[in-house]
Amino acid sequence: MSDSANAPEPPVPSVGALSSEGLSPFRMGLARVKQNRAAKAAFWVVSFYVFVAVFAPVLVRILNIDPYALDREAINDFGLPAGQLGGISWDHPFGVEPGTGRDILGRLMYGARISLLVGAIGTLLTTVVGVTLGIVAGLRRGFVDALIGRLGDVTLAFPSLLLIIALANPMTQRLESWGVPAGNTARITYIMAVLTLFGWVYMARLVRGQVLSLREREFVEAARSFGAGTGHLVFKQLLPNLWPQIIVFVSLSLPGYVALEATLSFLGVGLLAPAASWGIMLGDSVRYYRAAPTYLFIPGVTLMVLVLAFNLLGDGLRDAFDPRSDRQQL
Amino acid sequence: MIFFVLRRSFFAIVLLLIVSAFTFVIFSALPSDPAALTCGKNCRPEVIESNRERLGYDRPLVEQYGAYMKGIFAGRTYGEEGSSIHCSAPSLGYSYDRHECVTTLIASTLPVTASIALGAFVLWMVIGVGLGTLAALKRGRWQDRVATAFSVIGVSLPTFFLGLIFIMVFVIWTGLLPFPRYTGLTENPVEWFMSLLLPWFVLAIISAATYVRMTRNGILEVMNEEFVRLGIAKGLPRRRLIVTYVLRAALVPIVTIAGLDFAFLLGGALVTESIFNLPGLGKLTLAAVINSDLPILVATTMVSAVFIVVANTVVDILYGYLDPRVRVK
C-alpha cells in the first residue's frame, strides 16, 4: 500500500518492489499475507491457542485452578454450579462443570492440547501420505498413476463420516489388542489413522496435477539433463514449487480436523471422559441446557473461535499463494 | 454420447462392487463376533452356534459375500423351515438385535433423512446462491462484506454447536418452537414442517457458507469472459445479461457439486439427526454403533455408498452432456 510505484493496480497488496529482487514465490506469498489484516489477526489468535495448549500445566498452576479436581463447594445440592452464570467467580473464571464442580477454564486449556494435537498430527500425516502418493503418481505416471487414481476413487466412494463413526469402537479394541496403550491413546491413534485414510486423496490429486505440469518445465528438464536422480528432482526441484499449495491445503484442513475431533467426541465415539476434550464438554452440556447455559456457550465459542481463526488464516494464505486469486483481484 | 454414458455406468457398477466387497471385509474383520452378539450376555454356546449357522457366519467370507449379494436381488431366507426368517427382495441382512430385516429398518428411516436432506438442500441453494450472487454484483460494498462474513462464520461453526444454539434460543429461551418431534409428512404436514424447520436451517446455514463463496467467485470469473464483454458492448440490459448468461454459466459447476453434497446428506445427517432426535438413517447408524449391530452398519454404509456413487455418475454424465470436452477423455 505504501509503495507508489505500484499505483496502477491498487487492489493488490504491493509486492512489486520486492519481487524485482528475485524473491521465491514462497517469500512473495508471505509478504502478501503480512498485508492481510484478518489473516494477521487470525495468526495471533492461533498463536495464543498454541501458547495456552503448550503451557497449560504451567498456566493452570499460575491461575491456581485444577482441571481435574472436584470442587464440592462450587456446586449446590442439586449438582448445579452455585452462584450466577454457571458459577463464575474469582476461583473459577469461566465457572464450573455441573455435577462435578471441575473448573471449566482449566479443562478448556487442556482441551486445547487435544484439539491442536489431533488437528496437527492428523493434518501432518494426511499431508505426508497425500504428497508422497501425489508425487509418485505424477512422476511415475502410467500404471502406478492409474492405480493411485482408482484407489482415490474407491476411497471417495465411501461415506467417510459414517464409516469413521461405525468403526470407532471395534477398531479401537483392535488397536488395543495390537499393543497400543488402551483408552484415549488408542482412540486418538484411531482418529488420526482414519483421518489420514480418508483425507489423503484431495492432497494427492492436487500434488499430482502440479507435478504433471512441473515435470515438463525447463528447469526440471535441465536438472534431468545434468543427470539428476529422482531424489534430487523430488526434493530440490519439485517440492520447493509445491510448498505454496501444500501450505494452503494444510491451513484449510486443520480447522476441519479440529472440528471433527470435537464432533466425534460429542457423539461419544471420539475421546472418552475424563479427558478434557471440548467435544466431550459440549456433549455433556446437553444435559444441563436450562440450568447452566454457560457450560454450552463457553466451550462452544472457544472451539468456534479457533476454527474461525484457522479458516481466516487459511483464506489469507490461499489469497496470497494461489495465483488464480490474483487474477480475480485485477 | 451413448458410449460415454455406458462407460460411466459400467465404471460405477464396478466401483460399487469394490466398495461393497471392501465394506464386507472391513466389518467381517472386526474383533467382535457377530454370532455372539445375537443374544444377550448369558447366552448358551449352543444358541450362539445355531445362530451362527442360521445367519451363515460359519461359511467362508467369499461365500457370505455371495449370499449377501444374491439376497439383494433375490431375497434371503435364514435357517431351515419351521424356524426360518425371510427377508424379501432387496435384502440387506437381518438384525438380530431388532428382530427385523435391515431393509425394513432402512425403508422406515430413509423418508426422514430424505425429508431433512431435501428441505435443507432447497434452503441452502437459495441462501448460498442468492447471497453469493448479491456479493458478486455488489463487490467490495457492504453487501459483499456481510456475505463474506456469513460464509466464513458458517464454515467455522461446527454443526452440533449451531444445532445446540438453535435449540437453546428457539426452543428453550423464547419458546417459539416446540422441541422437534418428528411427524410423518402424510400424518400431519404442518407438524412435519415445524419439526424439520430447525434441522433444515442448521444444515442450510452450514452448507450455504461454502456455496456463497463458490457462487461469488464463479460469477466474478465468468464476468471476465469474452462473451460477457461482448454482451456489454452489444448493449444487453444488465439484468438480462446476468440472469441469462452469467448465472447460467457460473451455476453449472455449482449445481453439480450440490448434487454430490445432497447425496452425501442422504446417507444420513448423523449429527443433525442426533441433536434433534430425528429417527433417520443417521440415528439408525448411531444406535447400531452403540449396540454393535453389524448388519445394520454394513447396510447403511453400502446404501450411503450407492447414493454417493450414483450421484457422482449422474453428475459426470450431466457434465459430459453440458460440456462436450469432458467426453473426450
Image: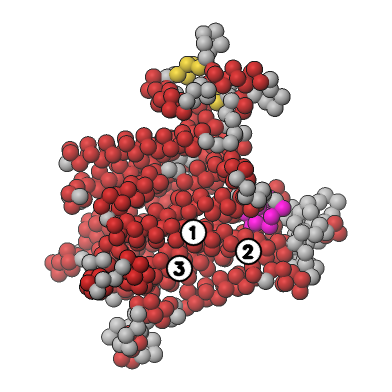
> What span is in magenta?
A274-286
- Where is B229 relative to B13, above or below? below
In this view, the mark in front (2 or 1): 1
Q: Name the residue under label 3.
A: A314
Query: Earlier along the polypeptide chain: callout 3 or callout 1?
Result: 1
Quadrant the N terminus of chain A occupies: bottom left
- Where is B260 relative to A325, above or below? above
So how many labels did they put on this image?
A: 3
From where the camera sits, is residue A158 visible?
A: yes
Q: Mark 3 lies on which chain?
A: A
**Callout 2 amino acid:** Ala
Cα separation, mark 2 vs mark 1, equals 20 Å
Q: What element carries label 2?
A: helix
Q: Mark 1 points at which residue?
A: A125
**Callout 3 amino acid:** Gly
**Callout 1 amino acid:** Leu
Label 2 close to label 1 by CB (< 8 Å): no
| Residue A234 lies in quadrant | bottom left
Identified at 34% across, 61% down, the residue is A135
| Residue B311 lies in quadrant | top left
The coloring applied to the image is secondary structure
Q: Main secondary structure of the magenta part?
A: helix
Cα separation, mark 3 vs mark 1, equals 18 Å
Identified at 17% across, 49% down, the residue is B328
Q: Mark 1 lies on which chain?
A: A
In this view, the mark in front (3 or 1): 1
- Seen in the image, is B127 located left or right of residue B13? right
Query: Earlier along the polypeptide chain: callout 2 or callout 1?
Result: 2
Q: Mark 2 points at which residue?
A: A112
Q: Is residue A280 magenta?
A: yes
- Seen in the image, is A329 located left or right of residue B324? right
> Residue B163's spot in the image, x, y percent?
57, 51
